[in-house]
Amino acid sequence: MPVHNSVLDEVQYQVKCYLARHGAALDCACQRCQEDVVALAASQLPTRYSTSPKGRVLIGVELQSKQVQLDILQAILSAIETVNQSPRHDPSRRIVG
Ligand SMILES: [Zn+2]
C-alpha cells in the first residue's frame, strides 16, 4: 500500500472550500497559483503519513480537531498572502482584464 499524506489531502480540500467561499482572497485563480497555495500551506504543517487504511482513519479523526483545523486555516491564509505577493502563475493561463 502506498504511503499516504493525509495532511496534504486535507489541505487540498480546505483550500478548495476556502477559495469557493472567499475567491477574492487570492489575487489570481490560475491552476499554478492555487497549487502553490496548497504546497505552501502543506509545507508549514506537520506531515502525517499513513501506510494503512486504519492509520488513515485515525489521522483523519485527528485532522478534524478544532486546533488542527485552525492551524490548517492559518497556514492557508499565510500561503495565500505569500502567493499574492509573488505569484508564479500557470504559463498557459488566460490573462483576464
Ligand atoms: Zn496565477
Image: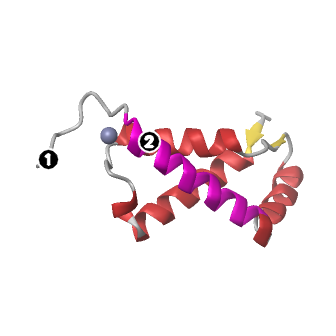
In this rendering, position of residue 11 left or right of residue 5: left
Q: Which residue is mark 1?
A: 96
Highlighted range, magenta: 68-87
Q: Are marks 2 and 1 in contact (CB under 8 Å)?
A: no
- According to the picture, the residue beneath numbered tag 2 turns out to be 83
Q: Amino acid at mark 1?
A: Val
Which x, y percent locates residue 20? 41, 66
Q: Which residue is located at x 50 percent, y 65 percent?
A: 17
- Which quadrant of the frame does ligand 1 lie within? top left
What residue sits 81% from the left and 44% below the top? 48
Look at 38% across and 54% down and name the residue there.
26
Q: Residue 28: horizontal and vertical position, in percent?
A: 31, 48
Label 1 crowd bin: few (<14), some (14–19), many (20+), radius 10 Å: few
- Horizontally, is 20 left or right of 38 in the view? left
In the structure shown, which secondary structural element does the residue marked by tag 1 occupy?
Answer: loop
Q: Ligand 1 closer than 8 Å to the CB at disc 2?
A: yes
Magenta span contains residue 75: yes
Real-space Cα separation, disc 2 to disc 1, in angstroms: 18 Å
- Crowding at dot 2, Cα within 10 Å, few <14 / some 14-19 / many 20+, comes out as many
Prevailing secondary structure class for the magenta stretch in the rendered image: helix
